[in-house]
Structure formats: structure tokens, C-alpha cells
Image: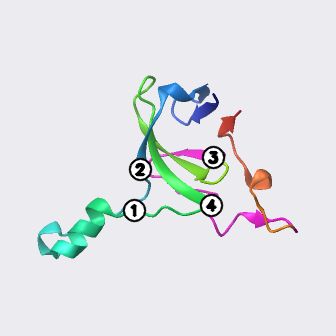
Amino acid sequence: MFQIYCPYCEELREEEEFHPKGEAHITRPADPEACSDEEWGDYLFFRDNPRGVHHELWVHAVGCRKFFNITRHTVSYEILETYRMGEQPTITAESVSRDPAGRESAATARQEGVRA
């Protein structure tokens, strides 16, 4: 079990209090009525599933019940940062440095996020 930092409660809480809700930063089409069926289907059903740094939407279901975003590494499950809705991530796949062995390392850019 690990703990997740809630950016609204401003404290670390156990992971059982949180629920993932999918990919973060999905933009709803400006005019859904003008979308083709294919465009609307892409918006509703298709999500990225990258290997590496990924931004996800989570909810603090047992605590403040607010939605927030997490930057997580999908291979190691390491949470690199948490941030409020409407904010932009400070850690992206492009900003993660690489060590000489070619492994991704975000330890230098890490903010409060998780403690194992």
C-alpha cells in the first residue's frame, strides 16, 4: 500500500481513498453536434495508454471528493506529482531526464506525490 498526496486536502492519504477516472486533459469538442460519428467516438472511447509518463484524472472519493490530476509513470507505477484541476503538469514525458543507462528518472523533478 502507498500514500497519495491530495492537492486540495494538502496531506498524504492511503490509496484506498482514491479512485482513478482515466486520462487527464481530454478536450471536449467545441460543437458536438457538428462532429462526425468517428470524431465523437474517438472523443468518447479512445484514450492514450503510453509506456512511461502519463497524466491521469483521479478523485479523492473518501476524503474531500474533489477531482485532481496525477502524473504517473505507467511502468513503475511511481506517482511523480499531483496537481489541481485547471493547472498544468510540471512534469511531462519530454521533461523527464534520462540517465546514462537510458532509464527514465524523474527524481530530480519530483514534487510531492507519493510515499511507498
Q: State yes or no: residue 95 in magenta.
A: yes
Please, is residue 32 above or below residue 109 in the view? below
Residue visible at 61% across and 59% down in the picture:
53
Where residue 100 sits: x, y (%)? 88, 69
Question: Spatial distance from mark 2 to mark 3, Cα to Cα?
Answer: 15 Å
Residue under label 2, please give it. 22
Question: Spatial distance from mark 2 to mark 4, Cα to Cα?
Answer: 15 Å
Please, is residue 97 above or below residue 71 in the view? below
Question: Is 56 on the left-hand or right-hand side of 45?
Answer: right
* Residue 29, visible in the rendered structure: no
- Label 4, secondary structure: give it: loop
- Label at residue 47: 1
Question: Spatial distance from mark 1 to mark 3, Cα to Cα?
Answer: 18 Å
- Label 2, secondary structure: give it: strand
Look at label 1 and name its amino acid.
Arg
- Label at residue 52: 4
Residue under label 3, please give it. 77
* Other-residue count near label 3 (Cα within 10 Å), few / some / many at <14 / 14–19 / ≥20: few
Residue visible at 66% across and 46% down in the picture:
78
- Label at residue 97: none
